[in-house]
Image (cartoon, rainbow, N blue to C red):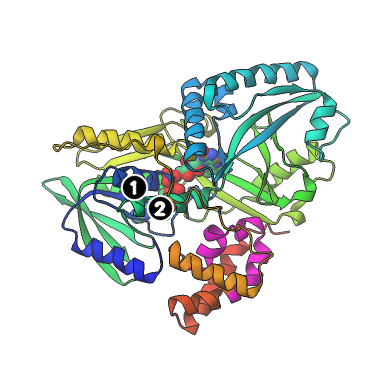
Amino acid sequence: MSGMRQREHHWDRIRTTEEWDVVIIGGGASGLGIAVHAASSGLKTALFERDDFAKGTSSKSTKLIHGGVRYLQQGNIKLVKESLRERGLLMQNAPHLVQNMKFVLPTFKPWRTWYYALGLKVYDRLAGRLGLGRSESLSKEETVALLPGIKTDEIAGGASYHDGQFDDAYLALSLAKTAVHHGAALLNYCEVTSFISVNKRIQGVEVHSPLDAEKRNVRARFVINATGPFSDSMMALDNPKHKPVIKPSQGTHVVVDSSFFPGNTAMLIPKTDDGRILFAVPWHGKIILGTTDTPVDAASAEPVPFDSEIDFILTHLQRYLRHAPQRTDVLSAFSGIRPLVKLTNKKTAELARDHVIRVSRSGLISILGGKWTTYRKMAADVMRKIQSLSSEKIALSDTRMLRLVDCNTPPLSPSIENMNDAELKERIRLEVEQSACLTVEDFLARRTRQLLLDARHAIKRAPFIAACLAEQLIRDETWKTEQIESFNALAQLYLPQD
Ligand SMILES: Cc1cc2nc3c(=O)[nH]c(=O)nc-3n(C[C@H](O)[C@H](O)[C@H](O)COP(=O)(O)OP(=O)(O)OC[C@H]3O[C@@H](n4cnc5c(N)ncnc54)[C@H](O)[C@@H]3O)c2cc1C
């Protein structure tokens, strides 16, 4: 993973390798997790992402590595237990990207405090020795001390617990680097356009990279569909009679200045008007508020927050915060699409967050659903499926103990707000060299998180970034102008209209 020279190296390997053991379609949490597991098991592994790594849902999450208090409420103990175990493992294997965060649920009635405190004790118990700290019931004074921005008049008390918080795009890039370290070939901006089939069995994929003006057939023993919300389109490409199994649901977040919600503790609003939960979480010096659950007809690569979603989030926060943010205070609003698996006729909030593996008649292996927290377990299950289908013996690595390659390096700044031109230029050089940064959007949305932290500031710096990138990538003026224009158009979608 890397600059253009290394991109060429990955292409050379794609061109010269006669057959891969595993080809993965999709470079989000699911696909990258599988790439790490397959490559560290010694399998010849290639991954193709049609856009940038983590451009999809995997950079638009709430940024929690969590057991899921809500799943506990729903009685999905198996999922909570599995997620809490994965949370503990990830804190060991990616300590540079996942941190322990304290959450407080404020309550308006004393009996609610005890109700939540009791439930959270179950959460502690399920985490066992991988727990991050004990939950506690809190007096009104303790609640207000932990949440200094909260309205005090009606608060009865609260309950606190611990969960993990992370940077989703950074973790995705760290997984990509780890997969490459173990020998995988990875290409962003390279789409899988069709399958190669012989006697109705999938034997590879056709890939197309407009960026490199290259189309190629890539042969593989196993082809994995890890395209998240787009899984149905891949399954339909394999089998035109395929009936959709993904029920896409949009989730929106709003980012505001930390002055609206000071302190280092996150807040969980246990019940919204539509019966969900809502978070206010400190993240990279700002506050993330969200999320929503809005069923949509189809997945899109760049979902746009609905006005109603932004209003919904702000209205709920207004009930809890003394100085509540208004629409004009929103620094950025972003949406992701949940790849929920449609197993029943339930509401999207109740559909399976568990993952499901489907193998088609022609041999396409699809990993459906899941969440960031369980990406490692999802990958392990896919690899076990491959092991069971393989005619040759495969010895799988144990990724429970596999540290990510850069786990001893502190992550680089997610914000560019305090960088001068020289620092910014150096950072761009680094990202081009080391993490396959190819566009202004890559840099501002995922190599740093400026677009999500403050879209206006991102727009302001886009021309300088385009100029530095053009120099690094040897691009002309037209490219530079196009990059600025397309980034500005994108960033407008992150700013709510008045
Ligand atoms: C609002 C929201 C909040 C969430 N919060 C959390 C959270 O706090 N914690 C948590 O654990 N989970 C959370 N999740 C769930 C988690 O983010 C997702 O389950 C996970 O990111 C899905 O990853 P994925 O790789 O399956 O899909 P994606 O990240 O969408 O990746 C699929 C990729 O496939 C690519 N692709 C599609 N077609 C092709 C093709 N033909 N060729 C090549 N590539 C292709 C796409 O470009 C995309 O990058 C949240 C989800 C949402 C929507």
Left or right, 75 with reference to 6: right
From what the image shows, is residue 475 above or below residue 361? below
Amino acid type of the residue that numbered disc 1 sits on in the rendered structure: Ala
**Is residue 289 depicted above or below 137 in this figure?**
below
Q: Which residue is mark 2?
A: 176
Q: Residue at x 84, y 36 (%)?
A: 151
Mark 1 touches mark 2? (CB < 8 Å) = yes
Q: What residue is rendered at 60% in x and 46% in y?
A: 252
- Name the residue that disc number 1 marks: 35
Secondary structure mostly seen in the magenta stretch: helix
Position above or below: 24 against 357: below
**Is residue 267 found left or right of 204 in the rendered image?**
right
Of the two numbered discs 1 and 2 on the same chain, state the one appearing first in sequence. Answer: 1
The amino acid type found where label 2 is placed reads: Ala
Magenta span covers which residues?
A: 438-464
Q: Residue 366 occupies which quadrant of the picture?
A: top left
Residue at (48, 82) in percent of width and height: 478
* Residue furthest bottom in the image: 477
Left or right of residue 136: residue 371: left
Q: Please name whichever residue, 134 or 344, is drawn nearer the observer in this view of the structure.
A: 134
Q: Secondary structure at mark 2?
A: helix
Q: Residues within 10 Å of mark 1 (few under 14, many from 20)?
A: many
